[in-house]
């Protein structure tokens, strides 16, 4: 379960005491009820104190949850960034590395290039859930591949690296 720590208890001379043990953690910085930043860390207490000392992000609450592995932590961080679209998060290579694409970047990943209008139609008709992030619609590539096969009967073949 997520835990909340009001920022009013923090100052530069006081160290945040969340947990000292290393755990795979996804955390949220909140301003009021709005998520303003999503991050991940193994040592959550050090990371939050780093945010406080840098004083670049305005927030008054911290929420976090633990994951079972580093891979799960990274995947969940990406999912949360795409879901919440926090103002302090920027687009990173991890978002595409963990299986998310825009319509144009999705099209380039396959030998038999799917027509862009068909990709957009699958998003528009609700066959695939998309998330608005940095003025683009993002969706899970695996879901799009499955929807493409189901709706158009075409199995997309990825370009090998």
Image: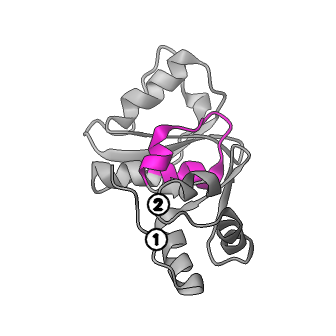
Horizontal and vertical percent position of residue 94: 45, 43
Looking at the picture, does residue 121 appear above or below residue 82?
Answer: below
Residue 18 lies within the magenta run: no
**Is residue 43 shown left or right of residue 102?**
left
How many angstroms separate mark 1 from mark 2 (CA)?
6 Å
Res. 118 image quadrant: bottom right
Estimate the x, y position of residue 57 in percent, counting from the top left: 63, 26
| Residue farthest to the front, as pictured | 112
Q: Residue at x 65, y 47 (%)?
A: 85
Mark 1 neighbour class, 10 Å CA radius: few under 14, some 14 to 19, many 20 or more:
some
Coordinates of residue 97 in the picture (x, y in percent): 42, 48
Please determine whether, in this image, residue 96 is positioned above or below residue 47. below
- Using residue 109 as the reference point, say whether residue 71 is left or right of it: left
Q: Assign a secondary structure to mark 2.
A: loop
Bounds of the magenta segment: 77-98
Of the 4 image quadrants, the one containing the N terminus is: bottom left
**Badge 2 is on which residue?**
110
In the depicted structure, whether residue 51 falls above or below residue 34: above
Q: Is residue 64 at all visible to an observer of this figure?
A: no
Say which of 15 and 143 sits in front: 143
Q: Is any part of residue 160 visible from this angle?
A: yes
Taking the spot 57% from the left edge, 51% from the top edge, the residue there is: 105
Q: Which residue is mark 1?
A: 156
Q: Is mark 1 in CB contact (under 8 Å) with mark 2?
A: yes
């Amino acid at each position: 379960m997520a835990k909340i720590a009001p920022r009013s208890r923090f100052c530069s001379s006081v160290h945040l005491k969340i947990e000292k043990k290393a755990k795979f953690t996804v955390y949220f910085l909140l301003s009021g009820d709005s998520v303003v930043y999503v991050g991940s860390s193994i040592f959550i207490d050090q990371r939050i104190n780093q945010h406080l000392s840098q004083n670049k992000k305005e927030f008054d609450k911290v929420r976090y949850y633990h994951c079972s592995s580093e891979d799960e932590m990274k995947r969940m961080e990406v999912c949360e960034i795409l879901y919440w679209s926090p103002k302090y998060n920027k687009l990173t290579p991890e978002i595409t590395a963990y299986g998310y694409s825009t319509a144009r970047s999705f099209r380039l990943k396959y030998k038999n290039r799917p027509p862009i209008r068909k990709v957009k139609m699958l998003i528009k008709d609700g066959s695939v859930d998309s998330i608005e992030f940095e003025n683009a619609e993002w969706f899970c590539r695996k879901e799009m591949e499955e929807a493409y096969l189901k709706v158009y009967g075409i199995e997309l073949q990825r370009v090998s690296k």
